[in-house]
Amino acid sequence: MKKRIAIFASGSGSNAQKIMEHFKYSNLAEVALVLSNNPEAYVLQRADNFEIPSHVFDKKTFYETEEIIDILKRLEIDLVVLAGFLWLVPQNLLKAFPNKIINIHPALLPKYGGKGMYGDTVHKTVLAAGDEEHGITIHFVNENFDEGEIIHQAKFKIEAEDTLEVIKFKGQQLEHQYFPKIIENLLKKYN
Ligand code: GRF
């Protein structure tokens, strides 16, 4: 049977798009559900375009009930992928999917992670620090923001003339290049 992926995203969902594209004709896995805390998130439109069902939930449901776990279990989800999802994952969900929840972060963790470190803030902080390199991290999710075990990192050199927009773009290119492949490699290891 194909492995089943659930994607959580709060915004645009360009990474979700790449993952849905990657697995559209795969024999290994499929994206079974897209979930969002944001009813306006463009990722929901993207899911629709792929005819993948989606589910929107609110904070109370996420943190105070088992509803999301029930949905994921009912759909026999094998891997939960956070792709631009901004809420901390609650303990009950972590326990229900041990080592089965991964995230992508737009920096080279453990630098530039933690609460509030998302979007442009990350890239602005990297530029202000004068770092010579920047990149992305794919990691397992635990009870703290951006702290789970690292699965893969990819880097690029920051050139003297690079602006915020440029490093953001370079990082996004790496995310799109690696995230679907890393997911595939992980799923190949599951029985
Ligand atoms: C990405 O930069 C990812 O690293 C971070 O959130 C962003 C999501 O972008 N966690 P998109 O919605 O996939 O375009």
Image (cartoon, grey):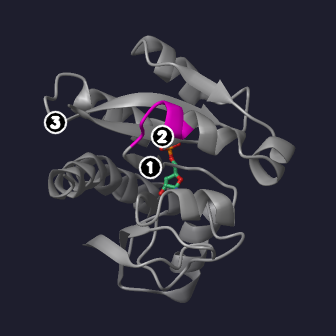
Marks 2 and 1, how far apart in space? Answer: 5 Å
Q: Quadrant of the N terminus?
A: top left
Nearest to N terminus: mark 3 or mark 2: 2
Residue 170 relative to residue 73: left or right = left
x then y, percent, for residue 179: 30, 52
Q: Is residue 170 above or below residue 29?
A: below
Quick one: label 1, few (<14), some, or many (20+) residues within 10 Å?
A: many
The residue under label 1 is which amino acid type? Answer: Val
Q: Give the extent of the magenta segment.
A: 72-77
Q: Residue 7 carries which label?
A: 2
Label 3 residue SS: loop
Label 1 residue SS: strand
The residue under label 3 is which amino acid type? Answer: Leu
Asked whether residue 75 is drawn in magenta, I would say yes
Q: Mark 1 points at which residue?
A: 81
Residue 119 relative to residue 40: left or right = left
x then y, percent, for residue 190: 21, 55
The residue under label 2 is which amino acid type? Answer: Ile
Q: In this view, does 175 lie above or below 49?
A: below
Q: Mark 3 points at which residue?
A: 28
Quick one: label 2, few (<14), some, or many (20+) residues within 10 Å?
A: many
